[in-house]
Image (cartoon, coloured by chain):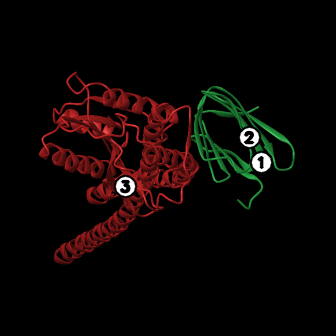
Amino acid sequence: MGAQLRIYRRRMRSVKATKKITRAMELISASRIVKAQQRVLASSPYSTELTNAVTAVATFSNTVHPLTSAVENPRRAAVLIITADRGMAGAYSNAAIKEGDLLIAGIKERGLAVDAYLVGRKALNFYRFRDRAIAQSWTGFSDNPTFESAREVSAALITSFLSDTESAGGVDELHIVYTEFKSMITQTPIAKVLLPLSAPQSEEPAGILAMYEFESSAETVLNALLPRYVEARVFNAMLQSAASEHAARRRAMKSATDNADELIKSLTRLANAARQAEITQEISEIVGGADALASASAGSE
Amino acid sequence: MASSVLTVEVVSPEKRVWSGEATSVSARTLDGDIGILVDHISLLGVLVPGVVSIKTADGSKTDFDMAGGFISVNKNRVSILGEEAIPS
């Protein structure tokens, strides 16, 4: 076998092996999207009910609560960015990080300092590599978040929100950046304000909702409700991000598999051409040799 | 209110644990036990760890062990939210 042909065969073998891997990852992600999507759906009654409840308290009481009222001169904001732990998902993590950068630039323009809270190894590595300050980070659950991990993250956020801005780690605003799972083909990074609650948008006019009775007082209810509200929002963001991650990975792996197919096709053509060239060369060598022998023996007669 | 039953939902962060129609719901809030019947005033309460029991429309009784949470009542819709709601 000629050297050229051997090189082509070797490259084809390696592309085929890669294709098997990307195909497997595509199938795995495809099966996990469905599960992740179901988890988003399953968690939505809880967060809808909590949002309704928070809206009710905020609408039907005049309680002033640190979690609902904006500070006059905010000094510091926390930004939670949710990304993936693993790569191979196309632009998924980078898109979220870019969205976060935009948000951070906007906040800094307003004269606030920014604390970065990161979820996912990709964001962590991005920040570390660029020597940016990280307030806190969590890794290891991006593709299958549990409520426990959401609670851990929100606990840190709420603590820093409730502590004084003068002290280390205290913040006046909470922002969250995650990837919204709109459909199998559309996932968009999105930035939202978690706290302070901007006057909850009640879709119905206030008259339709009845007056509420609070057990025991509006303030206690709010105190208990808001941390749960943040947890539910963070959990929902994590679940949506996880579903988006799987969708992005499936798409990236699908195009990698398609590209591998293309590559194998063109390599096969090149290898065939090389084999043909080799055969042609061998034939002409034999014919040439035979001719030379014939003319040599013809001369001796 | 025209309806004569309560529409009850018990939800946890991960899933809807139970939903159905009931004639009464009793739960323990910070202020003590409360019972909710049809046409109760809109209410929002903080639950303390304890048992929430639901008397369903067909007469049977369903209990849930709650590790804290909330109860919200609005127009014969009762939502019970808890980080942990275990049927007992």
**Residue drawn 36% across and 44% down?**
A197
**Which mark is on residue B33?**
none
Residue type indicated by callout 2: Val
- For disc 1, the neighbor class at 10 Å (few under 14, some 14 to 19, many from 20) is many
**Both labels 3 and 1 in a single chain:** no
Disc 3: which residue? A15
Instruction: Say which element carries label 1.
Output: strand
Q: Hue of chain A?
A: red
Q: Is residue A20 above or below residue A145?
A: below
- Name which residue lies at 38% across and 62% down: A255
Mark 3–mark 1 Cα distance, whole angstroms, equals: 62 Å
Left or right: A96 in relation to A46:
left
Report whether B2 appears left or right of A164. right
Q: Residue A92, percent across and down?
A: 33, 52
Q: Is residue A255 above or below residue A37?
A: below
Image quadrant where one finds the C terminus of chain A: bottom left
**Which residue is at 36% across, 67% downward?**
A262
Q: Colour of chain B?
A: green
**Residue A1 drawn at (x, y percent):** 33, 57
Judging by the rendered image, the residue that carries numbered circle 1 is B22
